[in-house]
Image (spheres, rainbow, N blue to C red):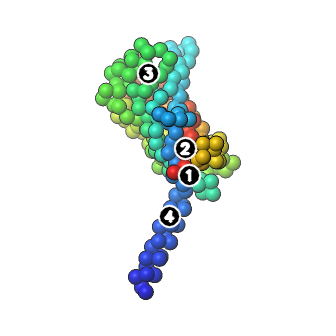
Amino acid sequence: MKVFRKSLIAACLCAGVAAAQGAEYVIDGSGGGMHSSVTFRASHIGISALWGRFNDVSGTFSYDAKNPGAAKISVKIAPASIDTNLKERDTHLSSADYLDVAKFPDAGFVSTHIMDMGAGKLHVMGNFTLHGTTREISFEAVKTGEGETPFGDYRVGFEAEAKLNPKDYGINFADELRLILAIEGIRQ
């Protein structure tokens, strides 16, 4: 009876931990649906803005609308998927002069702390890795929607904007890079 009681208690604790973490979602990034994006904006020689995006985005997150602060996020970006609407520029940005994708094929973000700010807003803190360097960043994210879809699944979406200095990551580029994220997750 003691073994049964301990097993029952352990099962309840595990269920409680799973409930506290929320549902698991896979980011609908590259491939099939591509309902997520990481877009960037950088100053071009102080005259205008260069806009682009990374076409290979993937990752996972956990989310529970009743406990948003317990969410966890892991986003992967393939720098080689850079797309500025000009192949020659993309090739140059991928070279050792900038992103050096041969040496640094991975970039991404992993959350360390998320705070619920109410009204669908979250303050997100975590580690962003680019060009082989990891730095702590923070930004505000906003839930854009949640629910059953015509595709027969359940999804939740968020938008966020993070600002960083590429020079902090060893990249001699603009002084400020704005990353604009639109993330849609499919509940597993």
Q: Are marks 4 and 1 in contact (CB under 8 Å)?
A: no
From the top left corner, tell me how far across and down residue 106 is, in percent: 37, 34
Q: Which mark is residue 185?
A: 2
**Element on which disc 2 rests:** strand
Return the disc, 3 or 2, that comes first in the chain's sequence. Answer: 3
* Front residue of this view, candidates 3 and 104: 3
Please name the amino acid that badge 4 sits on: Val
Q: Which of the two discs, 2 and 4, sits closer to the camera?
A: 2
Q: Is residue 32 above or below residue 101?
A: below
**Mark toward the start of the polypeptide (3 vs 4):** 4
User: Does residue 100 appear left or right of residue 77 in this picture?
Assistant: left
C-alpha separation, residue under disc 3 versus residue under disc 2: 31 Å
Residue at position x 67%, y 50% from top? 118
Residue designated by label 1: 63
Mark 1 surroundings: few (<14), some (14-19) or many (≥20) residues within 10 A: many
Q: Amino acid at mark 1?
A: Tyr
Give me the C-alpha separation between circle 1 and circle 3. Answer: 35 Å
Farthest residue toward the left?
103
Rendered location of residue 133, percent (x, y):
37, 35
Task: Label 3: state its secondary structure.
Answer: loop
Label 3: which residue? Answer: 173
Q: From mark 2 to mark 1, how far is it between C-alphas?
A: 10 Å
